[in-house]
Amino acid sequence: MEAGGEDKYKAVMELAKRRGFFWPSYEIYGGVAGFYDLGPYGVLLKNRIVDKWRRFFVQDHSNYVVEIETPIIAPSKVFEASGHVENFTDPIVECLKCGRKFRADHLIKDALGIDVEGLSPEEMTRIIREHDIRCPVCGGPLGEVKTFNLLFRTQIGPYEGNIGYLRPELAQGMFVSFKRVLEAMRNRIPLGIAQVGRVGRNEISPRQAMMRLREFNIMEMEYFIDPEDPEGSCPFFQREAGTRLRLLPWRAKEAGGKPEWYKLEEAVREGIIIHPCLGYWMSVAQRFMEALGIPVEEMYFEEKSPRERAHYSSQTFDQLVRVSRWGWVEVSGHSYRGDYDLSRHMKYSGADLTVFKPFEKPRVVEQTLYIVDRGVIGRLYRAKAPEVLKLAESIPQEELRRAREEGRSIKVGEYEIPPEAIRVVKKKVKISGRKYVPHVVEPSFGVERVVYVTFEHAYSTREGRIVLRLPRDIAPVQVAVLPLLEKDEALREKAREVYHTLRREGFYAVYDDSGSIGRRYARYDEIGVPAAVTIDYQTLEDNTVTIRDRDTWKQARVALDELVNALRRFIYRGASIDEIGTLVG
């Protein structure tokens, strides 16, 4: 019988620690909240999950998606442009008696059971006062709710004031490198830029073990599209059009509704998902989590309301998976970021991050252009006028238009261009294409969260023994090679020979001759090894071995010269134990 709720969580964590998957960091110093170590098998499991993510999101779309690496630390200007310096905050409240600090929205939810994510600090303060919510540690009164920026700040080099931040997401490195990648990929749109790497978020009061960490890994992709060509932006949409997704739109959520099943093409047609590319990558995400052993009934996509969405998002769905202790937890986020990021980086850097799309035939059109009047600038700045005019060349047309219409100046360098210096001219021009700022669809996964939910869903018991039923192709160790008896040198020598053969063939294998064969089977069931190869006395006679299936405990006898092929079929192609050999026992 399976443990449930808190009992299952404790059993899962005990196994994870005992068998070397994961545990709280810095244990000998009492631990630090928000940091977790991955042990030997945890690293192997994480790497296999990342490799599988690459197969689903990068390799399966290799004509459109590429992977890059960018630095962990970026100069302050990058995060000023992205809006993180201003907007990447959580609400914080301090106990006026003991001085402890808490995340205010979590405190309110724990006390009242209501979700206040996205409310202003003033609104949260009012709720705390009205309901007399107090410090959960000492019972003292709470102060005013304020905002706390989650960026980890550092100094780049020896000079004070040269501020940098540890990246809180991978996205900005991909946006800043967009033009370089676009050129390398022959200026083709759509273009996906993927990245896997570490990030840091200085969480106020991290909890839920590996669900909310201060340092963790992300698997992320920015998919750049032409906003005027939704069909061409997602050429593989029909692959997933008939897939059923369980969705909870934000209006239904606020009305107390529950997730409902929709065909992807229906959800896009009805506007529940605002763009086919957003829906497509959500469908891929569902298949990915299924491939990690999560049933579709144990996941759904919940839309963020406008007040819950990040500052860059036009629509966001969180992919939620059910776990024993906390119920539904987020494993990935899927956002339509529009042109927010590229437009901001163009504004702050002056770089041209537009894409040019040629027409089939050149067109003659009448254009309304906004230009800076050389005469007005000459009268204002005299000898410095050429420098000002040169700087003005980088001002986008849209910004010139808005400045003229709103009657405000534009600052370029240390100079200002007044609205009366902006002229409107109309002229006919032949154009061979159009320039546009791509829009972006982003699927983003927290690696450690995925590791945990995969591990928990694989945890099972059979006849009082733990069996970690991980999908075979992501198991940390793929095959255990075991001599039947630990003290028979002939069996041990043959087993070591088989072990070295499997390692040379690319399997992650272990050799073990310690303890009874039953104890060893149990040991490798606990760490999720899908296949155990046993060398017995019949092996010495006819060069056959048995392969034991972790999940069914059935065994099949296979000739040694067929072993490598049989294991590949079993581990990578999903063959059953009776399909790869003759059942025994």
Image (cartoon, rainbow, N blue to C red):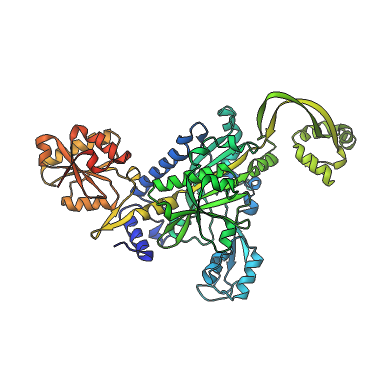
562 left or right of 237? left
Compared to residue 564, the image places residue 4 above or below, namely below
Front residue of this view, candidates 434 and 404: 434
Numbered label tally: 0
Residue 550 x, y percent position in the rendering: 25, 49
Front residue of this view, candidates 283 and 192: 283
Task: Let me know if residue 412 appears in the view.
Answer: no
Task: Let me know if residue 571 appears in the view.
Answer: yes
| Quadrant position of the N terminus in the picture | bottom left
Compared to residue 414, the image places residue 189 above or below, namely above
Residue drawn at point x = 41 percent, y = 59 percent: 323
Residue 9 x, y percent position in the rendering: 37, 61
Residue 541 x, y percent position in the rendering: 9, 36
Front residue of this view, candidates 76 and 81: 81
402 left or right of 108? right
178 left or right of 350? left
Compared to residue 500, the image places residue 119 above or below, namely below
Residue drawn at point x = 63 percent, y = 44 percent: 338
Residue drawn at point x = 79 percent, y = 26 percent: 429
Residue 276 x, y percent position in the rendering: 57, 42
